[in-house]
Image (cartoon, rainbow, N blue to C red):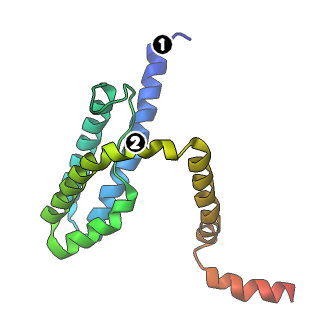
Amino acid sequence: MKETNSRSAVLGLQHLLAMYAGAVAVPLLIGTGLGFNEAQMTYLISIDIFMCGIATLLQLVVTRFFGIGLPVVLGCAIQAVSPLILIGTKSGISAIYGAIIAAGIFIVLIAGIFSKIKVLFPPLVTGTVITVIGLTLIPVAITKIGGGMPQLLTLVIPRIYC
């Protein structure tokens, strides 16, 4: 299939929008949790988008140490929001940056170990684990869709069926 410039532009825009959603949500949550003003929030979001772009560019080049040769969107991990807010409220923004740098160094040091034990996790195992996680999140999603009041279910449902 021949790629046209217009199709490439649309796919590039889609890639950019997908990256922005993940790259903006995490700094917004962290900045809000730390009570940042507009200038601080702008700086936090800008530096995050910049670093996501650099990480994505590093994936485009294949070397011995990094890169897969594809434009993979690399962004912030949402699971780090709560620990970063806790670190920020106790020790400030510099401690957040220090924790991120320390975690990055730690990950680089242990990455070789995980590349060797990857064979212990075939697609059947990882797929099953991800499916079970997704299935256990269904009740949470339904509760959130219903307004986030699970106690209402215990009051209303027994009276309807009894």
Q: Nearer the viewer, residue 95 or 68?
A: 68
Q: Nearer the viewer, residue 82 or 152?
A: 82
Instruction: Count every numbered label the image shows and give the total.
Output: 2
Horizontal and vertical percent for residue 25?
37, 55
Does the image show residue 159? yes
Give the residue type at disc 1: Thr
Horizontal and vertical percent for residue 147?
59, 73
Q: Which residue is mark 1?
A: 4
What secondary structure is marked by label 1? Answer: loop
Horizontal and vertical percent for residue 9?
42, 23
User: Circle 2: is it few (<14), some (14-19), or many (20+) Cα within 10 Å?
Assistant: few
Q: Quadrant of the C terminus?
A: bottom right
Q: Could you tell whether 134 is left or right of 70 in the image?
A: right
In the displayed image of the protein, which residue is found farthest to the right?
Answer: 162
In whole angstroms, how far apart are the C-alphas of marks 1 and 2? 40 Å
Q: Could you tell whether 129 is left or right of 64 in the image?
A: right
Which label belongs to residue 116?
Answer: 2
Horizontal and vertical percent for residue 128?
62, 52
* Residue in the image at 13% along x and 62% along y: 94
The label nearer to you, 1 versus 2, is: 2
* Residue in the image at 48% along x and 13% along y: 4
Q: Quadrant of the N terminus?
A: top right
Give the residue type at disc 2: Lys
In the displayed image of the protein, which residue is found farthest to the top?
Answer: 2
Residue 18 placement: quadrant: top left
